[in-house]
Amino acid sequence: MTEMIQCVGCGAIIQTTEVDEAGYLPESALRKGLEKGTLYCQRCFRLRHYNELKDLNISDDVFLNRLSEIAEDKAFVVSIIDIFDVEGSLIHGLPRFIGNQPFIVFVNKVDLLPKSTNLKRVEHWIRRILKENGLFPNDVILGSASKNHTLAALRTVIEKESKHRNVYIVGVTNVGKSTLINNLIAYYGGEKEVITTSNHPGTTLDMIRVPVNEQYAIIDTPGIIHRTQLGLHLNREELKMVLPSKLMKPTTFQLNPNQTIFIGGIARVDFNKGERTSFTFYVSNDMYLHRTKTENADGFYQAHIGELLQPPFKENVDSFGTLSPRTIQLKADQDIAISGLGWFTVNQDVEIVLWIPKGVGISIRESII
Ligand SMILES: Nc1nc2c(ncn2[C@@H]2O[C@H](COP(=O)(O)OP(=O)(O)OP(=O)(O)O)[C@@H](O)[C@H]2O)c(=O)[nH]1
Ligand SMILES: [Mg+2]
């Protein structure tokens, strides 16, 4: 009998028998790792050194069940929201998992927003959504997991609130939980980049406990999977194009009715009815935006999907499936956000037809910029 050892990078229990399951490590590597003292599973090792990710099939409930343990601990919770996908990353049922534990909301990746963003307004809007969803955090902090002033602010709150409570970092997949913990540990003077992070949803597989002092630990948790997120329909290379990695530069088109904009091959916006209007897109700078006449849009899509219009890449066009249309009335200065892709805004009342992959979530809100 060996005792259970966790992978330092993803939290999976190390095992040496099932190659295709979480925590696999060949016997020889296990022995070497034990001598050295730190153990990464094969999946983490490959991701960290070769940037290769092995996909694992893990059911969504496994993660949810693990999260409910938080309710039983003496816990303080930091719930992370991704500013790039607020509605997609909001956990509506948070109290169900964490019980009555005190929590704050950290809105991450604010570095992606254009410079002209009014952060006060963004904060106000987020506080309102939280309230509408019955979430009443002790505090809301906007920032970036990689920025020192954010880490300083979070550290202050954590030290004030944690008082003998373990600090759990929770959120939907890919919001930056592990990145935040890595940076907090480094900021506290510890080792760098201990936990494995990636742009792919589902990197962390189990709770990872990082003791801070005798009183409390910071605990990373596996991300909750929201099926409405675009990221679940894409592979890693495709994700790289779709997820902005730096400050987004908005792109504006002056459109007349019966014109169409393609956002790569992932979404299509037909301007159906209205006056000449400016449409401003906030998506990754790597996404190609193409304007065409609506009457030519079907033909253009058929001819260029997987090539000029990507993602999806050519080899994934079939599995990606077709786009489904939906007619939407949008008011002047409203945003329409597509979960995981970004958003666009109009300066007049318009009727549009929005084409997106089936199941991907959208939301309409007052423009945040
Ligand atoms: N621009 C920007 N990107 C960030 C920030 N924080 C994290 N990321 C990126 O977001 C992606 C996901 O980060 P992770 O830390 O692995 O996310 P996670 O929440 O632990 O994800 P899971 O383990 O899959 O649940 C990575 O590509 C990070 O580089 C941030 O403050 N700004
Ligand atoms: Mg993680």
Image: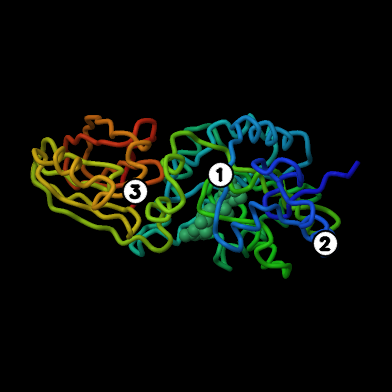
Drawn side of residue 191 relative to residue 136, left or right? right
Disc sitting over residue 274 in the figure = none
Q: Quadrant of residue 350?
A: top left
Few, some or many residues within 10 Å of mark 3 (<14, 14–19, 20+): some
Query: Do residues under tags 1 and 3 come within 8 Å of each other at their CB atoms?
Result: no
Could you tell me if residue 142 is visible in this image?
Answer: no
Q: Residue at x 28, y 31 (%)?
A: 324
Cβ atoms at labels 3 and 2 below 8 Å apart: no
Relative image position of residue 152 (x, y in whole percent): 62, 65
* Residue shown at 67% from the left, 53% from the top: 42
In the depicted structure, whether residue 149 falls above or below residue 313: below
Q: What's the CA distance linking mark 1 and mark 3?
A: 18 Å
Horizontally, is 337 left or right of 24 in the view?
Answer: left
Q: Residue flagged by tag 1: what amino acid is it?
A: Asp
Residue underneath mark 3: 313
Front residue of this view, candidates 176 and 262: 262
Give the amino acid at mark 3: Phe
Q: Residue 183: x and y, percent?
A: 63, 63
**Considering the numbered disc 2 on the image, is that residue within a helix, a strand or a loop?**
loop
Please tell me the numbered disc located at residue 37.
Answer: 2
Q: Which mark is residue 55?
A: 1
Name the side, left or right, on which 369 lies relative to 278.
Answer: right
**How far across and how far down the image is residue 90, in percent?**
50, 39
Q: Amino acid at mark 2?
A: Gly
